[in-house]
Structure formats: C-alpha cells, structure tokens
Amino acid sequence: MPNVIVIGASRGIGREFATRYAADGWQVLATVRRPADAAQFDGVAGITTAIADTGDAASLVALPAFAADLIVVNAGVGSREPGVAAIDPANWTHVMTVNALGPLLVATALGDRLKDGGSFVALSSLMGSIADNGGGGAYSYRMSKAALNMGLQNLALEWRARGIAVAALHPGWVRTDMGGSNAPVEIADSVAGMREVIAGLAAGKGAGFVDYRGKALDW
C-alpha cells in the first residue's frame, strides 16, 4: 500500500490531494497549520493529520515517522503588487520564505523518509515562468515561484542517484481562495490531472515544469 505526505492540506488543492489519495487506498499523512483544520479529516479512513509549517523546520522534523512513496508540497501564499513601488520588504520575505524556501525545508527534513525511487513534487505556477511573463506585476509571487523552480531543478540533480523524480507542477488557474471565483479550473479537475502527471513521473527524472494536463512549460 503506497504512502503519501501532503504538506498543506487544510483546504483547496491540498485537501483534495489528501482525500483523493486516501479514497484510492493510499495511506496519507496530511499536514495542517492549526489543530482546528485537522478536524475535517476526523474519521476519514487512511488519513493521519499532523501540525506543521513549511517555514518552521522544527515542526517538519517532528512529524510522525512515515516512509513515503510520494511527497506533495502544496503550501503557498499569494501576492499581487501592481508595480515595483508597491513591494513591501517584509511581505516579500514572507512570500519567498513560504513559496521558495518552504519546499526545500520539507526536502531537508523529510528527504530521508522518502523512499528511493519515489517522487517529490511541489506546486509552482506559470506565473513563475520568465519566458511566459508578458504581463508583469505580482513581483513577490512571480519571483518566489521562479526561485522554487530553480530549487527543484537542483534537488532533482542531487537526488538523481536515489532514483527520485522531482517535478514543479502548475495546477492551472484554479477556483480556490487564492485563485478567486473567476478561475476556470475546478479543484477536482486540477488535482485529478496532477495525479496523472505524478503517476507518470519517471524515477530519477530531472525536474519537469508541467501543468495539470501534462503540458511542458517554459522556464
């Protein structure tokens, strides 16, 4: 029976990942930031919850022992500065810490719990693509996802000898708290697509940057 760790399962995409994998018979360790967020999983077969924050390395190290076939890092925050003058240094640092550093702290803390030949994926965004950026704005968010993509490519090279596949996944513009009510992609459709992409990852493959439909994206 395969095991998955879902980092950031309180709501939206992360919650869908946790519940869908559990429904398919996986054992799931789902992390949330607050005890109140864990209650939604009470009585759900296959899901164990734990409190963790990607910005707090100690909370990740303290997670229950769990040998994972797959780690999914969903935790992230948004930011929408219209121009360079709107950048707030404290907010920029927070966004970069959560979105770019957070997944690498997860890899550091939980890497020895990920089985050789397993997969490690983190949610990125097309807004982190330098080649695709024709609109500008959203400085902190765009920069954090571009930095995340580079970090995942490095991780793929570092873990290649262990046969671990690493990928940056763009979930699409999804109807979540962050994506807003005008987003065209439903959470269930996004997660179903990403799960197909994850299932098709080749062991030891370098970091791919792909969307939920499996389309390769430009860095």
Image (tube, rainbow, N blue to C red):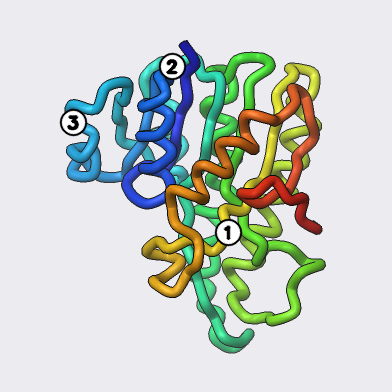
Instruction: Quickly name the residue at label 2.
Output: 66
Could you tell which of marks 3 and 2 lies nearer the N-terminus?
A: 3
Give the answer, above or below, for where 173 lies relative to 73: below
Q: Using residue 100 as the reference point, say whether residue 9 is left or right of it.
A: left
Which residue appears at 67% of the width and 62% of the height?
126
Q: Position of residue 154 (x, y in %)?
A: 77, 39
Q: Are marks 3 and 1 in contact (CB under 8 Å)?
A: no
The image shows residue 60 at horizontal and vertical percentages of 43, 32
What's the CA distance linking mark 3 and mark 1?
29 Å
Query: Residue at point 63% right, 21% down?
Result: 118
Residue 137 to residue 26: above or below: below
Quarter of the image where the C terminus is located? bottom right
Q: Nearest to the eye among marks 3 and 1: give it.
A: 1
Pointer 1 residue: 172
Q: Is residue 200 above or below residue 98?
A: above
Q: Secondary structure at mark 2?
A: loop
Q: Taking 93 as reference, is 170 left or right? A: right
Separation of marks 3 and 2 at Cα, in angstroms: 19 Å
- Label at residue 42: 3
Give the mark nearest the N terminus, 3 or 1. Answer: 3
**Label 2 amino acid?**
Phe
Is residue 65 visible in the rendered structure shown here? yes
